[in-house]
Amino acid sequence: MITLKGSEIYLRALEPEDLEFVYAIENDESVWEISNTQTPYSKFLIKQYLENAHKDIFEVKQLRLVVSSYGNEPVGLIDIFDFDFKNKRAGIGILIKDAKDRDKGYGREALQLLINYSFSHLGLHQLYCNISEENKASIKLFTNQGFVNVGLKKDWNHVNGSYKNEYLFQLINN
């Protein structure tokens, strides 16, 4: 699908071979805060998830794609969640796994591709994302793609014994 191919990366469906990659991300406690994860996942559960990842977004209300280099190395994941066909909106989230792959434009290109796909193929009217007030890199990434800060959710997430604020960003397809 041309829509999901960029100059440096492409977005692809999850494959059974992605088990170790997804397992490593889901069990990396340093990113649990952004995914609201509380507990580790077993390889068994992730394998089951991968076996069902082919289900239609209209059925399961989410879509997870691998951000892949053209060397076919997975570098991250990008998600559509809370897919709401009636109101034509969905949440979006992205994670580039390793620090060595950040600041190379992979996140920017993946986000551009998913925005285009969401508006042109899924017919969405708007996308939104939730970003911790402290996550300056994500705030920059999303605002550079046209997302607008529409609100601050005070004391929204309880992390390591304290509460953190979270911004709500929105992109409307005009």
Image (tube, rainbow, N blue to C red):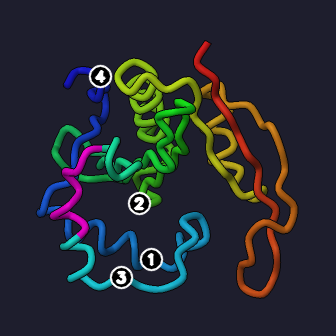
- Image location of residue 127, percent across then percent down: 57, 34
The residues bearing labels 1 and 3 have C-alpha atoms spaced at a distance of 10 Å
Query: Label 4: which residue?
Result: 3
Q: Amino acid at mark 1?
A: Asp
Give coordinates of residue 63: x percent, y percent: 35, 47
- The residue under the point 42% across, 49% down is 79
Percent coordinates x, y for residue 82 in the rendering: 51, 49
CA distance for labels 4 and 3: 32 Å
| Dot 2 or dot 4, earlier in sequence | 4
Asked which secondary structure carries label 1, the reply is loop
Q: Which residue in the structure is indicated by mark 1?
A: 28
Q: Is residue 146 above or below residue 18?
A: above
Relative to 89, residue 18 above or below: below
Spatial CA distance of label 2 from label 4 is: 23 Å
According to the image, label 2 marks what residue? 97
Is 165 on the left or on the right of 84, as rendered?
right
Q: Which mark's residue is nearer the viewer, 2 or 3?
A: 3
Q: Nearer the viewer, mark 4 or mark 1?
A: 4
Q: Are marks 2 and 4 in contact (CB under 8 Å)?
A: no
